Image (spheres, grey):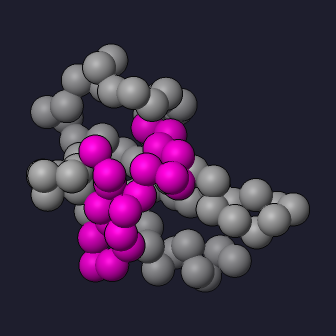
Amino acid sequence: MSSFSNEFIKRPVVDANGELFGHLGDIIIDPRSGEITELLVEVIAEIDVTKLPWPMEEGFCCVPAQEVSQIGSRISLRR
């Protein structure tokens, strides 16, 4: 599974307006179901992380997989 996630690491993550939110740091996968549960995003410095609706852990914003609207050359969030 690590080779799958490595293809996406460092891809830009954008908000619903197409503005840069950060870059993908890692993908969290549920070992029982094999489903992606969270994306760990390294948020750009211009964003105040205290105002985000998602928690921060070890420098990464933990974005639930349900918040992703599209994955391609960039990862788009629903908000």
Question: Residue 58: x and y, percent?
Answer: 52, 32
Which residue is more in the foreground, 4 or 76?
A: 76
Quick check: 40 above or below 48? Answer: below
Q: Residue at x 69, y 60 (%)?
A: 29
Q: Is residue 11 left or right of residue 46?
A: right
Give the residue at the far top of this rendering.
Answer: 50
| Residue 34 x/y as whole percent | 76, 69
Tell me if residue 69 is in the magenta stretch.
Answer: yes
Q: In the drawing, does residue 13 fall left or right of residue 37? A: left
- Furthest-right residue in this view: 32
The magenta segment is 61-79
Q: Position of residue 46 (x, y in %)?
A: 14, 33
Name the one closer to the observer, 49 or 69.
69
Looking at the rendered structure, the number of numbered marks drawn on it comes to: 0
Picture quarter containing residue 13? Answer: bottom left
Residue 29 visible in the picture: yes
Q: Quadrant of residue 48?
A: top left
Residue 1 in percent (x, y) is at 69, 77
Image vertical order of residue 77 relative to residue 44, above or below: below
Residue at coordinates 45% horizontally, 31% vertically from top-left? 54
Q: Quadrant of the C terminus?
A: top left
Q: Residue at x 43, y 67 (%)?
A: 9
